[in-house]
Amino acid sequence: MPDATRPTPSALYRWTVLIFISLTMFGSYYAYDALSPLADVLKAQLGFSDKNIGLLQAIYSFPNIFTVLIGGFIIDRLGLRKSLMIFGVLCVIGPAITVASSHLWVMSTGRLIFGMGAESLNVAVITALAKWFKGKELSFAFGVNLTITRLGSFAALNSPTWAGRAYANWRGPFLIALGFSSLCLIGAIVYWVMEAYAEKKYHLGEASTDKVVFADLFKLGVNYWLIVALCVVFYSAIFPFQTFAVKFFMEAHGTSREFGGFLSSMLTLFAMIATPLFGLLVDRVGKRALLMMLGSMLLIPVYLMMAYTHVNLYIPMAMMGVAFSLIPAVMWPSVAYIVEQSKLGTAYGLMTMIQNIGLFGFNLLIGWANDYSHASADNPAGYRLGMWIFSILGFLGVLFAFLLRQRELGPHGHGLETITTAKAVA
């Protein structure tokens, strides 16, 4: 019978698809964050500097500066099934190369290949969610997907607790990461089977991808670029910190690797629980630019508190956790209010591209800063330069959010401060 007259997939079938494609991202998130608890082991056993460790994390983001430019080209040309399979294979090959050699250039090559696969995999998963859930429970589906994927980060950062013996040798944690990265391929295979079966029986939605259309770059407006600027400084203050967080907690505050990993994972734990709640709050009260400004304010003191005091580390990490939950819950949806629907894919694609430029640069910069200041257990004060850099990024976040709020309160506003669910329904 014609495709349009076929029934849509059942809720059970759709949610089963979601679970398996989310597991692919669980595997990629685990493999990405496996490096952080291992930093001091790489330093002790392989003689790596913080600049070397920063490179291993930064090079993951490097290919994504360019892959976003071609956006969904591969997905559009080959389809979701083949694309997920290709990206899943890259997500396994990369970690396999990383664990195969102790040479920095080989390990970096593995992280580079992994980055190419993992970020493209994320785009494919988001595209698949739109295909299966558009017009149904799309927002909730995204929330469930985010929770499952961030569990990968949580598991990796807490791996010293449940896989402590593996840290006797630098290869152990990377082998575990390789095992989890196999979920990227397993999930892709299951998705292939489920979509191929569904295409014969059901009517499926159309896939859409985030592609950069160069002609649209000059039509996005000042408010959009202020959000992009906030995005860059905010994520550059969070993820490069996490790269060195466990090592910093151990050397500057004398924590165990297990406790340091848990402290770092608090950001993920907060985000899994609080991001949807903040999303509901914002829908009800508006004030989006104001909330982004308040979230950025939380970042300014936390790094200096950890650098200059012996405050209970739960306090600054909880403050960071609130910011890490609040700002993304407001920032990404805000783009949809200020950019036309026809340009939304370009807007998100460009935002992701520039974000990866920031992550690449600041992972390298913080690694350099730690080495320049001789940061170590014997010289904890050496971490202060990096902490000042993070605090300055928090200040810039406040500035960009303040400028955005000023424009939104004036004639160039798009309703970020005023639109609420109640008004939208009315």
Image (cartoon, rainbow, N blue to C red):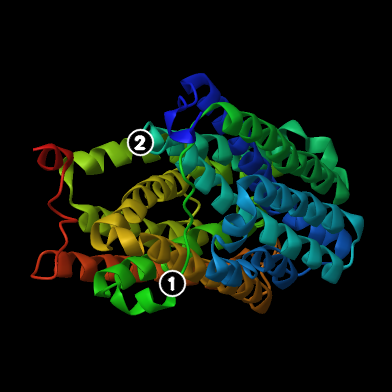
Q: Is residue 53 left or right of residue 297?
A: right
In the image, residue 317 lies at what x, y percent?
A: 47, 47
Relative height, residue 151 to residue 379 (above, below): above
Relative height, residue 291 to residue 232 (above, below): above
Q: Between 6 and 382, which is closer to the camera in this rendering?
A: 6
Q: Is residue 336 left or right of residue 35?
A: left
Where residue 135 is drawn, which disc sits there? Answer: 2
Q: Residue at x 10, y 64 (%)?
A: 409
Where residue 213 is drawn, which disc sits there? Answer: 1
Q: Answer yes or no: is residue 255 visible.
A: no
Q: Amino acid at mark 2?
A: Gly
Disc 2 vs disc 1: Cβ atoms closer than 8 Å? no
Q: Amino acid at mark 1?
A: Val
Q: Could you say whether the residue bearing mark 1 is in a helix, strand or loop?
A: loop
In the image, residue 406 lies at what x, y percent?
A: 15, 69
In the image, residue 141 lies at what x, y percent?
A: 44, 34
Q: Quick one: label 1, few (<14), some, or many (20+) residues within 10 Å?
A: some
